[in-house]
Amino acid sequence: MKNNIAKIILCLGFILSSHIFAMKNSSLPVSVSSLEELIKLLDSHGIGQSEWIKPPKALFEEIQLGECFLEIKDGKLQRTVAVVTVECFYTNDIGEKFQLVETKQVFKSGTIRERGFKYIAEKMQAGEEPIQAALRGLKEELDVSTSTLQVNSKGDSNQYLASSKTYIGLPSTYNKYHFEHNISKENYKENYVEHQEDKDTFFSWIKIEQ
């Protein structure tokens, strides 16, 4: 009798521990309906916001737009975002080739961020295909018409987990899709500036040695 009870207890303990392990290693989407709820969620996971480049309001707006979502994975809060990158090139009349690079971002708070991106980057919105996000990114960041634009997929994508450089301390999974675009003479400018509510992003050209 005692042996049977011991076996039952051992079995129940195994089931419980397996259930706890599965919960810790599963992915559970998290929804937030207000900024206050988001801040409470971040605080409950020990994620402070004092060093963030953007305020929590910006993250909440990303969630509302469907540009990212939050989930509990392996017991930890993380952000998942899909991003397209577009490498932009221009060839002048004498055959010299140039590539567009992001030189800096100047936030309204006075913070200056230099990421050194050799592409424009745009977060995908809910229901958007990668190519649609790429064309929207060209229009919004370079202020060019997308009616005749063409982007070419580089045929590769990648996924990785890293700490967000914007929302410092918040682990983020990035799903990236890569494209190329050749700027026409009509859309060429020596410099481009994207003006947004919270920041200005500056782009310029670097010559590619052939």
Image (cartoon, rainbow, N blue to C red):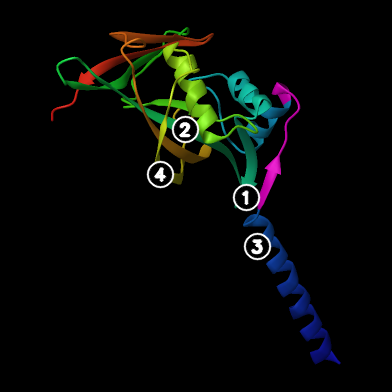
Q: Which mark is residue 21?
A: 3
Q: Which mark is residue 75?
A: 1
The amino acid on which the numbered mark 3 sits, given as a three-letter code, is Phe
| Image coordinates for residue 172, horizontal then vertical, percent | 52, 39
The amino acid on which the numbered mark 4 sits, given as a three-letter code, is Gly
Pick the residue in front: 173 or 207.
207
The amino acid on which the numbered mark 1 sits, given as a three-letter code, is Gly
Pick the residue in front: 150 or 107.
150
For residue 155, above or below residue 204? below
In this rendering, position of residue 18 left or right of residue 170: right
The amino acid on which the numbered mark 2 sits, given as a three-letter code, is Val
Residue picked out by circle 2: 84
Q: Which mark is residue 155?
A: 4
Residue visible at 71% across and 74% down in the picture: 14
For residue 66, above or below residue 176? above
Distance CA(mark 2)–CA(mark 1): 28 Å
Secondary structure of residue under mark 3: helix
Few, some or many C-alpha atoms within 10 Å of disc 1 (few <14, some 14-19, many ≥20)? Answer: some
Distance CA(mark 4)–CA(mark 2): 12 Å
Asked whether residue 166 appears in the rendered view, the answer is no
- State yes or no: discs 3 and 2 in contact (Cβ < 8 Å): no
Secondary structure of residue under mark 1: loop
Q: Which mark is residue 121?
A: none
Secondary structure of residue under mark 2: strand
Image quadrant holding the C terminus, namely top left
Pick the residue in front: 90 or 44.
90
- State yes or no: discs 3 and 1 in contact (Cβ < 8 Å): no
What is the total number of numbered labels drawn onto the structure image? Answer: 4
| Image coordinates for residue 186, horizontal then vertical, percent | 35, 9
Front tag of 3 and 2: 2
